[in-house]
Amino acid sequence: MADAKVIPFGEEPRSRRKVPRLGRGGRSQGSLKPVPQQRDEEPEDPQTAAAAVPPLPPGSPKPAPGSGDWERKLAHGLSFLRRRITGDYEVDDFGYDHDLTEQVLMSLLRPLSDKYFRVEVKGIENIPDSGGALVVANHSGVLPLDGLMLQVAVHDHHPAQRHLRLLAADLVFVLPVINELARKAGHTLACAEDAQLLLERGEVVGVMPEGFKGIGKPFSERYKLQRFGRGGFVSTALRAGAPIVPCSIVGAEEIYPMVGNSKTLARLLGLPYFPITPTFPLLGPLGAVPLPTKWTVQFGEPIPTDGYPPEAADDPMLMFNLTDQVRETIQHTLYKLLVQRRSVFF
Amino acid sequence: MGRKALILGKVVLVTGVARRLGGRFVRRIQREPDVERVIGVDAVPPEHHLGGADFVRADIRHPTIGKLLAEYGAHTVVHMDINGTPLGARGNRTSVKETNVIGTMQLLGACQKAPSVQRLVVKSSTNVYGSAPRDPAVFSETTPPKSLPSGGFAKDTVEVEGYVRGFARRRPDVAVCVLRFANILGPCADSPLAEYFALPVLPTVIGYDPRLQFVHEKDAIEVLRIAASEPRRSTLNSGTFNIAGDGVLLLSQAARRLGRPTLPLLLPTLRWARTALRSLGITDFSPEQIRLLTHGRVVATNQMRETLGFEPEHTTAGALADYAHSRGPGLLPPETLARTIDRLAALLPAGAQT
C-alpha cells in the first residue's frame, strides 16, 4: 500500500530511489525554476532526520538552550498563565486568539509538522511580507491535517511569521470543542463575506476549494484535483485585489489511505463521508493514527489580481479562466513534486 | 407643520420609560435645546424619576396611543418598549411578546395617522441576526441571517423590524432609524446578559466559547439621542445601524475578567439549569440567549461610524470593566489571582523575570 503506484507517469524505478540526495537536489533545481534550494544538506537517514534539530527560521519563538533556561521558561509560563486567568488578552472579530495560538496551539502542532511529517517548505517567499494574499491549496487526507500543517508552515517559515487564516467547512463550526479551537486558531467559516473581510484587513487567507470532495476522495484518486467549487475564491480575491498564491501539498494523501467509504454510517452520523482505511474501524482509535509520510509544501508564484477592473469580479468567463489557471498550476506542481519524491515515507 | 414644530421646539414621545434605560434617555433628551416637551409612556409607572417629563400611563397595545400622539402633537417618537425580559417578576413571556409585536403594530398604526410625526427611532437588537454556526463571522446590516430565529425575543425583533419597514414605505416623509443594539451593559443596565453575568457561577455550554460584543449604556443613550435629533452635517441618521462597542470578548474571557468561575454544562443540562433558576426566581435565560451563549454574535459597526457619525466612548472590554466595577468582585477576582502568580514569580531567582 505504501508503495502503491501513484501517478501514471514519471514513476521512478525502485533502484533509483536509493540514489544519493545530491543528485536529486541537482535535478530538482533544474526542473523547478521559481523555487530556490532551501535545504540541500538534509540528512539522508530518517533516524538522523528525526533526531537532528530541524532548522528553525530566524526569530523562531523557541528559546536557545542554555543554563538557567528552565527558570526563564517558568517565568515565561507564569506570565502566560497570569494573562490567561485574568482574561488579559485580545481576540479579534473572528475569535482569533493570538496569544493562545502562538504559545500553545502552534507548539502542539509543531512537533507533528517538524518531526512526524517532516514538512519541507518551498517557495515561502511567494507569500508577501505584508498585505492580503489568498493561498489556494489542494485538500486531502480524510482529516484536515493538511490545513493545520500549512498554517504551521506559513508561520514558522515565513520571515514575517505571518498567520494563515484558514477558511474551514461549516461542519467544523457545528462540532463542539472543535469549533472553539478552530476560532481561537484563527480559522473562520468558508464564506465570501468572511474571506473578503479578512483579505481587506491584509491577512493571509488559506482556502482549499476542493472541500469535502478533495479530503474525502478514495485512495485510488490521490493527487487528482477535484472540482474547485464554483470559483468563489477567485472573485473574492479579485474584489479585495489580493494575489492568489497556488500551493501544492504532497504527502497528505497517504496519511489515511481511504479504501472505502461507508455511506450509510456517514448518513447516520451526519458526516459527509465515513472513511474506511486498512486500519481505521478495525483497530479502533489506534487506526486513527496517521501514517508518518514525508510531506512537501510548495508555494507557487503569485497570480496578481489587482490589474482587473472592479466589475471583473462579476465576469463568469474570467472567473472560470482564473480558476482553471490556479487549478492547473497546483496540479502540475503536484505531478512535478511526485516525480521528485523518492518514497512516500522518506 | 414642520416649521411650526421647529419654532416651538419638538415634542418627543418615548415608550418604555419604566425601564431604567428608558428613564435615563428621557432625562437626557430633555436637555436638548430644541426639545420643548417629553412625554414618557408605559403601562406601569416608573420607579425612577423622569426629570421634567410628563408621564402618561398608557398601554401601547391599545388604540389610546393614537389619541395621545394626536393630543400632544408628537414630532419624534422613540420606541424603546421592545424587550427580551418582562419588567419585574409579575410579567410573563406572553405579555412581553404582545407588547413587542402588537404594541409596535399599534404604535406604528397611530404614527401613520399622525401627521405631526416626523421622526421615528426604534430600539432593536442584534438578535435579528440569530446565532448559528453556519453564519458568517461578522454580520453587517445587509447580511441576511442563514436561519431565522424560530421564536422568543429574536423572532419578535424580526417581526418588529418588518413592521417598521412597512411603516417606512407608507410614510416616506418620516425619517426612520432602527438601532440594532448589541448586549447593553453598564452599572444600571437591566439587560438579560447583565442578569446572567450577575450569577455567582456562570453556566456555559461545554465545547463552545462564543464571541460577545457589548455596548455601554451611556453609549446607548448617546446614540439614541443622535438618532432622535436632526442629523449633523455630513451624517445621516435614518436607516438601520448596528450599535456595538469596539472589540470582541470571548465568554470565557469575560468570565475571567469578571472573576466569576464558569460551569460548563452539556446543552440539555443547561436547559434544566435554566428551568431550575427560573423556578427559584433568580434569573431566566431564554432559548435565544442560550443560542447566543453557544455560538456568539459579532456585528460590523462601520455604518455606525461612517454614516451615523457615532463613535462609542466605551469599548466592549470597557463596558464589561465598568459593569464589573459596579457589581463588585466575583468568587475568583482577577486581581487576587494575578497577585498569587506574581508572588510565585517572585520566588524565582532574579534575572529570570522577563
Image (cartoon, coloured by chain):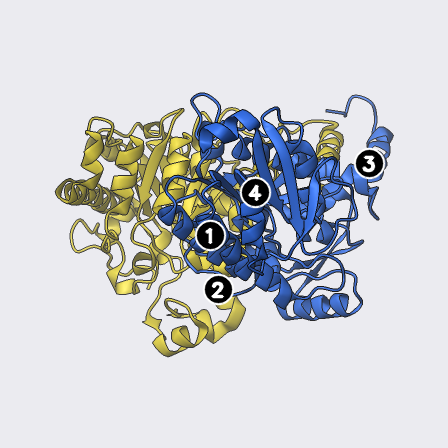
Q: Compute the Cα span from label 4 to label 1.
A: 14 Å
In this picture, residue B174 sits left or right of residue B85: left
Q: Are marks 4 and 1 on the same chain?
A: yes
Chain bearing tag 1 is B
Q: Residues within 10 Å of mark 2 (few under 14, many from 20)?
A: some
Q: Residues within 10 Å of mark 3 (few under 14, many from 20)?
A: some
Q: Compute the Cα span from label 1 to label 3.
A: 43 Å
Colour used to depict chain B in the structure image: blue
Colour used to depict chain A in the structure image: yellow
Name which quarter of the figure residue B213 lies in. top right
Chain bearing tag 2 is A
Q: Compute the Cα span from label 1 to label 2.
A: 50 Å
Q: Are marks 1 and 2 on the same chain?
A: no
Q: Compute the Cα span from label 3 to label 4.
A: 41 Å
From the top left corner, tell me how far across and down residue B252 is, in percent. 67, 48
Q: Earlier in the sequence, mark 4 or mark 1?
A: 4
Chain bearing tag 4 is B
Considering the image in quadrants, where does the N terminus of chain B appear?
top left
Q: Are marks 3 and 2 on the same chain?
A: no
From the top left corner, tell me how far across and down residue B201 is, in percent. 78, 55
User: Which residue is disc 3 drawn over?
Assistant: B335
Question: Who is closer to the viewer here, B301 or B122?
Answer: B122
User: Which residue is disc 2 drawn over?
Assistant: A288
Instruction: Determine whether the residue tagged by mark 4 lies in a helix, strand or loop.
Output: strand
The amino acid type, in three-letter code, at marker 1 is Glu
The amino acid type, in three-letter code, at marker 4 is Val
Which label sits in the foreground, 1 or 3? 1
The amino acid type, in three-letter code, at marker 3 is Glu
